[in-house]
Amino acid sequence: MPYFRVHDSNKLVLTNFKVMFTSFSKTSTFTKIKRYKAYFLLKQDDMQVHFTVRDPYQKAISLYKDKFQSTPRHVDLTKPVKWEKPQRIFFPTMGLSTKRDSDQKIQDALINTPFDEFIELLKECYWRDEHTQPQHWILDHPRYLLFKKLLVNQRRLTVYKMDEAEELDAFASSTGFDNSKRANSTAGITNPKEFSRASIETINSIYEKDFVDYGYQMR
C-alpha cells in the first residue's frame, strides 16, 4: 500500500515500493491507506498530493540488492520460508518452484543471480508486482479494473525526486517527514558495481515513461 495520509492535514503522499516506502511506513505522522481510500480522498478539492520518485536505474539496483541479495541471505532455513511476491514472480522464468524446490535451492539461486541476469529476468515479469512496475502506474494503472486512474489534479500534484537532496528536503518540509531517520537495509551491499549495455537498454525500455515524466537522464 504505497499510499499515505499525513495526520491532521489535507495531504496525501504517493510513492512506490523501493522509493523510501519503508521509511514512510515508519513515520508516525504518516498513515498507510489503500488505493480506494486515496481515490475518494482525492475527490476533495483541497487535497494536496506529494508524489515521490526515484531514478529508474537506482530503483532497479535497490530491488536487486534487497530481494536477490539481502533478504535471501537473512532467511532462516530451519523453518519454512515464505518467499515474497517480488521474488516469486521471477521463479517461473528461473525454473524454480516453491512446491518442488527446497528453500536452500531457492536461496542459492537468488543470491547467485548476477545483476545483468536479474534485469533479463525482469523483462519477463515486471508487470506482475508493484515493486517492479513503472512508477507512473501508481497514477494510471493499466492492469487494474477498479480505481485504475487516481484522477490527480495536476495543480495539486508536486513530484519530488528522492535522490536529489534539495527535493528531499522540500518534501520533508512540506509533509513533516523526518529525513534523519531514513531506513536502508541494503547499504552494506556493494554489488553491482557496473552493468551491461543490454541491461541499460532493458531498463530504458521498461521505464521509458518514468525517465521522461520525471526528468531522469537515460544512459
Image (cartoon, rainbow, N blue to C red):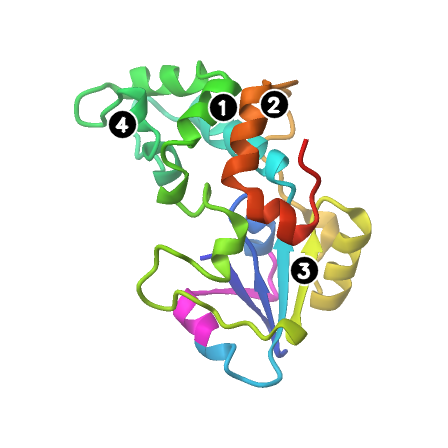
Three-letter residue code for mark 3:
Val
Q: Around disc 2, counting alpha carbons within 10 Å, would you say few (fewer than 14), some (14 to 19), or many (20 or more)?
A: few
Q: Which residues are magenta?
A: 27-39
Say which of 102 and 195 sits in front.
195
Q: Give x and y (percent) for residue 123.
A: 42, 32
Instruction: Assess whether residue 116 is covered by the magenta stretch.
Output: no
Say which of 78 and 94 sits in front.
94
Task: From the viewer's perspective, tell me whether residue 162 is left or right of residue 87.
Answer: right
Mark found first going from the N terminus, 1 or 3? 1
Residue to which mark 4 is pinned: 92
Three-letter residue code for mark 4:
Pro
Q: Which mark is residue 159?
A: 3
Eye-nearest disc, 2 or 3 = 3
Three-letter residue code for mark 2:
Ile
Q: CA distance from mark 2 to mark 1?
A: 8 Å
Q: Give x and y (percent) for residue 86.
A: 39, 38
Mark found first going from the N terminus, 1 or 4? 1
Quadrant in the rendering for residue 59: top right
Q: Around disc 4, counting alpha carbons within 10 Å, would you say few (fewer than 14), some (14 to 19), or many (20 or more)?
A: few
